[in-house]
Amino acid sequence: MSLMDLFKKKNSGDIAKDRLKLVLISDRANCSPDVMEMIKNDIIQVISKYMEIDAEGLDIQITQTESEGNNGNVPALYANIPIKDMKHTGPAR
Amino acid sequence: MSEVIVITSGKGGVGKTTTTANVGTGLAQLNKKVVLIDTDIGLRNLDVVMGLENRIVYNLVDVVEGNCRMKQALIKDKRYPNLSLLPSAQTRDKTAVSPEQMIKVIEELKEEYDYILLDCPAGIEQGFKNAIAGADRALVVTTPEVSAIRDADRIIGLLGANELKKVELIVNRLRMDMVKRGDMMNINDVTDILAIDLIGAVPDDEQIVISTNQGEPLVGSDCLAGKAFENICHRILGEDVPFLDLEIKTSIWDKIKEIFKKN
């Protein structure tokens, strides 16, 4: 335990607020895990046409991002898609 | 013109019934004619919180099914001549009443009362649908906890979907000592997240437990929670009342008293 840990430690009130913000974004977007799974599968299909990706390692979630033009934060679909091979290997040419 | 207000929360145990009892009593103290309806069929509680449990003869389901006249089911509170309670049934379930029947009951009560307060059950099923059917205005009660706020957000969404436009927030059971050291979300955090107008903030107060034990709402009494509920009543009437300074408890005088208590 160093002195720095004391400063780094976040208040549990702030943790609660951050967690709530995230959970409410997906609640409000009405994205059930089923829907998310469907989106994920479609993304895998589309991207696979152009490059080889790691379907197992693919991660998608709805988060918040700062909107460019106007006020504050807007929901955003975040996708982390690990690429195995940039070369095209799929059947479509 | 009478106004129909539903007190709801989604989550159970956040203080809907206590709020209904205190706001109802407070409005009656301000010389409004008020009727409280307990819509939690099967789990009635508003009667005990109000201290009127021994006077129940007929209930909401009896009125709906035509077993009695409205006047026979209404319990007049002897402490406040303007205040009545329509108790819920304890031995039936939520399906005993439909939203249409609730609206009919409310229409009949509108003729005589200025304010009709509906104590909503927890959840988002039939009981909730019954409670909000005839309402013009909703008070959403929450506590500064993740579970209660998440449920409140869901409820706010459902109220919007049911075209209930006037929706206001009560943040209940605030512990200012915890807020101060950052271990509880503060009022601004909660209103930021839920993005609706705040109509009241009620501190966690031992007096609430005591008043519920006694069956006497504490609105208007000389404690922070009593004042907070009184202010909510004024705001319901459209008055602009400043929010209480809830940190009053940590005054120097209180600190001195604390020191003496410890010794």
Image (cartoon, helix red, strand yellow):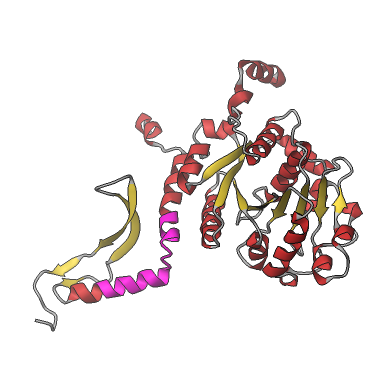
Residue B97, compared with residue B121, is above or below; it is below
Q: Nearer the viewer, residue B153 or A35?
A: B153
In magenta segment, residue A33: yes
Quarter occupied by the N terminus of chain A: top left
Residue at image coords 59%, 27%: B245
Residue B173 horizontal side relative to residue B161, left or right: right
Bounds of the magenta segment:
A24-43
In magenta segment, residue B64: no
Q: Nearer the viewer, residue B41 or A82?
A: B41
Q: How many marks?
A: 0
Residue at image coords 74%, 55%: B110
Q: Position of residue A5 (x, y in %)?
A: 38, 34
Quadrant of residue A48 within the rendered picture: bottom left
Q: Position of residue B94 (x, y in %)?
A: 72, 68
Q: Say if residue B122 shows up in the picture.
A: yes
Quadrant of residue A77 within the rendered picture: bottom left
Quadrant of residue B177 within the rendered picture: top right
Residue B236, compared with residue B70, is above or below; it is above
Residue at image coords 72%, 72%: B95
Q: Say if residue B186 shows up in the picture.
A: no
Residue B164, compared with residue B205, is above or below; it is below
Residue B258 horizontal side relative to residue B148, left or right: right
Quarter occupied by the C terminus of chain A: bottom left
Q: Position of residue B66 (x, y in %)?
A: 84, 70
Q: Position of residue A2 (x, y in %)?
A: 36, 32
As drawn, which residue projects farthest toward the bottom?
A91
Residue B68, compared with residue B168, is above or below; it is below
Residue at image coords 72%, 52%: B116
